[in-house]
Image (tube, rainbow, N blue to C red):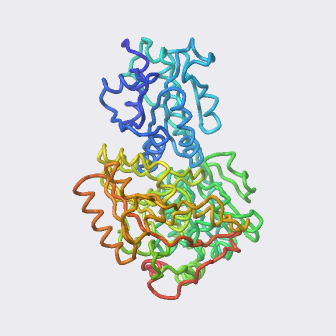
Amino acid sequence: MAKMTAAQAAVLVMEKEGVTQAFGVPGAAINPLYSALRKQGSIAHILARHVEGASHMAEGYTRAVAGNIGVCIGTSGPAGTDMITGLYSASADSIPILCITGQAPRARLYKEDFQAVDIESISKPVTKWSVTVREPGQVPQVFQQAFHLMRSGRPGPVLIDLPFDVQMAQIEFDIDTYTPLTPYRPAATRAQIEKAIAMLNAAERPLIVAGGGIINADASDLLVRFAETTGVPVIPTLMAWGVIPDNHPLMAGMCGLQTSHRYGNATMLASDFVLGIGNRWANRHTGSVDVYTKGRTFVHVDIEPTQIGRVFTPDLGIVSDAKAALELFVQVAEEMKAEGRLPNRRTWAGECLERKKTMLRKTNFNDVPMKPQRVYQCMNNNFSNDTCYVSTIGLSQIAAAQFLHVYNPRHWINCGQAGPLGWTIPAALGVRAADPTRKIVALSGDYDFQFMIEELAVGAQFKLPYIHIVVNNSYLGLIRQAQRGFEMDYCVQLGFDNINATEDSGVERSYGVDHIKVVEGLGCKAIRVYEQEEIKPAIQRAEALMAEFSVPVVIEVMLERVTNISMGTEIDAINEFEPLAERPEDAPTAIAAAMLD
């Protein structure tokens, strides 16, 4: 046993739990913890410019690498309330992050003290656990329980609130005998898996819907192995994009109202059986339950018991960690295949593949100012298959899901359910902190980019380089498109007459904010592009600038002001605003059809 402050004990526990990186903003009420971090020296720290930004950095850090848990630290009062959006985002997408806040001394709680807010109560709806620690001796075990909860069952965030005097108090603690608790993860039984496969075998046109739980469980290889063994096509949800490579013949496209493919929706509507693994039947994926479920039988596998039947009642529900379930799915399927007891799915898989080749949206526009569809075509042509994309919400993200290609798990880093504007920059910085070598390309519309643009200074200060594509139409594009139903275009224009614009073209003046000047003022590099022929040289220049300066490099692409992106209210009623593809250059990357044999 050794005598130490409770704050020192907290740092030692985090170290034992595998934490090596934290993000945050110090302040008076959390300085004892920062003092312990400095003295121990084992956990690196990145200083954010806004505590919400720090929470999103922690999210990006967790989402980037299996096993990571991002840590966000802030002081009392507004620091905690600034974290709420990050906690909501992490909770909605089943992402474990640990948020630590300072708090007024215990004697000053509930007395309207300066920056003393009941953050425990405020954050409870968006965390797995939120606690204000009132006894110093409980600090080590509270942190132990926090990591246990974050890793057990459906992952999610935890907030620990530490009063100043609790952090400063001396306690007895033996770190040498500390051991992390074993996470609880329910596992499917063989009988359940055999029943599910029997239902799958009885179907003529089955699909697998792969959810983000497969990514969380680090089970993408098992999912692909199971699909290949059975010959059943896969529809990933947005949170699982990359769980099977886009050019795999059994990747049947995404389904949904917005972030979807024409061929993905058509294949879902043609199916008669769906095996969902680690997904939550989100409304942007399903549309109305009646249309989505009509004529189809469902099996749902999820780690969270209350997720089964939450949106609609499946024909069979299995509570299980995705990896544990997939291990059994692979085992049983491979045994049945060896015995010749699996149906031949080549005809059905071939039909799905044919839709993937032919049911395409047009991208090969030559308009100037550019249409966004052409920007994504250029990105596909100029970024390699190992590129990791980071994005959050808006027409830019919706179009990205329709037109980009992703080939690896954790290479589409997206805030799926919450979708807060401003998420992209700090999340991309968190991804970079987690993986210094990954090729990272963030994608924003101009409004998302402006929301937390100050965090670019963090990338400059801490040498966190990545490329940021900003598609600028000087509009709240998604809201403008939604306002069509109200026959209005109201308070969604971002353009204004910028009196400081200097270029002769006048485009920057009418588009308002000069992002180039802002980005450079924050210590980063920026390039502006007007035509598709300029994109490839801009990307090459951006890569050279990153190598030279190790800072984020922004490529701003000036778009036409109004482009409507395909979407609808039902998966069988998507409004295709633009002409459909007719030329070979609009096709997805080459598909190895021979693999269907």
Drawn side of residue 463 relative to residue 48, left or right? left
Please tell me whether residue 373 is drawn above or below residue 392 in the rendered image: below
| Residue beneath the point at 40% across and 70% down | 379
| Residue beneath the point at 62% across and 15% down | 111
- Residue 23 visible in rendering: yes
Drawn side of residue 521 relative to residue 293, left or right? left
**Residue 136 location, x and y as percent?**
49, 15
Please tell me whether residue 237 is drawn above or below residue 165 in the rendered image: below
- Residue 221 visible in rendering: no
**Residue 3 location, x and y as percent?**
37, 12
Please tell me whether residue 96 is drawn above or below residue 438 in the rendered image: above
Q: Nearer the viewer, residue 293 or 366?
A: 366
Q: Nearer the viewer, residue 324 or 45?
A: 45
Drawn side of residue 486 relative to residue 470, left or right? right
Residue at the left extreme of this rendering:
548
Residue at the front extreme of this rendering:
499
Quarter residue 54 falls in: top left
Could you tell me which quadrant the N terminus lies in? top left
**Residue 400 location, x and y as percent?**
50, 67
**Residue 393 location, x and y as percent?**
55, 58
Q: Nearer the viewer, residue 364 or 313?
A: 364
| Residue beneath the point at 59% across and 29% down | 119
| Residue beneath the point at 57% across and 83% down | 580
How many numbered circles does the render carry?
0
